[in-house]
């Protein structure tokens, strides 16, 4: 390994590739494994720093939520109502 890559975070990143599901290179499953490794090897403080950076840069580390059709329809209607309220507010 090159000298620049000889640090714990980089090594944990590479170990995460070995442990993650085959074929998931930098998707949410890989990132979840990486975060878990950081937590167990480097501790909660480093984990929180890395997790906060992932959140800040919108890196996904959890599966996409699956919504029922009823919930999706309710969210759709709420969105439409909110858009209409804003349009009425701009007109007035």
Image (cartoon, rainbow, N blue to C red):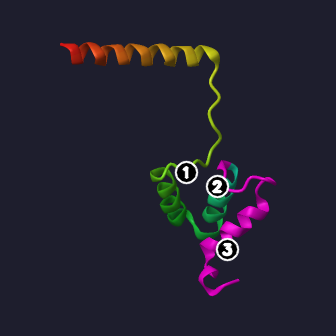
What span is colored magenta in the figure? 1-28
> Is 2 on the left-hand or right-hand side of 89?
right
- Report the quarter where the C terminus lies: top left
- Identified at 52% across, 56% down, the residue is 51
> Is 3 on the left-hand or right-hand side of 75?
right
Residue receiving disc 3: 11
Decide which of tag 2 and tag 1 comes sooner along the chain.
2
Proximity of marks 2 and 1: CB atoms separated by less than 8 Å: yes
Asked if residue 14 is positioned above or below residue 86 in the image, the reply reads: below
Relative depth, front residue between 92 and 5: 92
**Which residue extends farthest right?**
22
Give how far apart the Cα atoms at labels 3 and 2 are.
14 Å
Give how far apart the Cα atoms at labels 2 and 1 are.
8 Å
- Identified at 64% across, 55% down, the residue is 31
Residue 31: image tag: 2
Residue receiving disc 1: 59
Give how far apart the Cα atoms at labels 1 and 3 are.
20 Å
- Report the quarter where the N terminus lies: bottom right
Crowding near pointer 3: few (<14 within 10 Å), some, many (20+)?
few
Crowding near pointer 1: few (<14 within 10 Å), some, many (20+)?
some
Asked if residue 87 is positioned above or below residue 33 in the image, the reply reads: above
């Amino acid at each position: 390994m090159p000298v620049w890559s000889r640090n714990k975070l980089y090594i944990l990143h590479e170990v995460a590739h070995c442990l993650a599901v085959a074929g998931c290179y930098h998707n949410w499953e890989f990132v979840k494994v990486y975060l878990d490794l950081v937590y167990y090897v480097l501790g909660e403080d480093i984990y929180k720093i890395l997790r906060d950076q992932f959140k800040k840069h919108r890196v996904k580390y959890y599966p996409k939520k699956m919504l029922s059709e009823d919930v999706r329809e309710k969210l759709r209607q709420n969105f439409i109502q909110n858009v209409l309220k804003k349009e009425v507010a701009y007109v007035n």
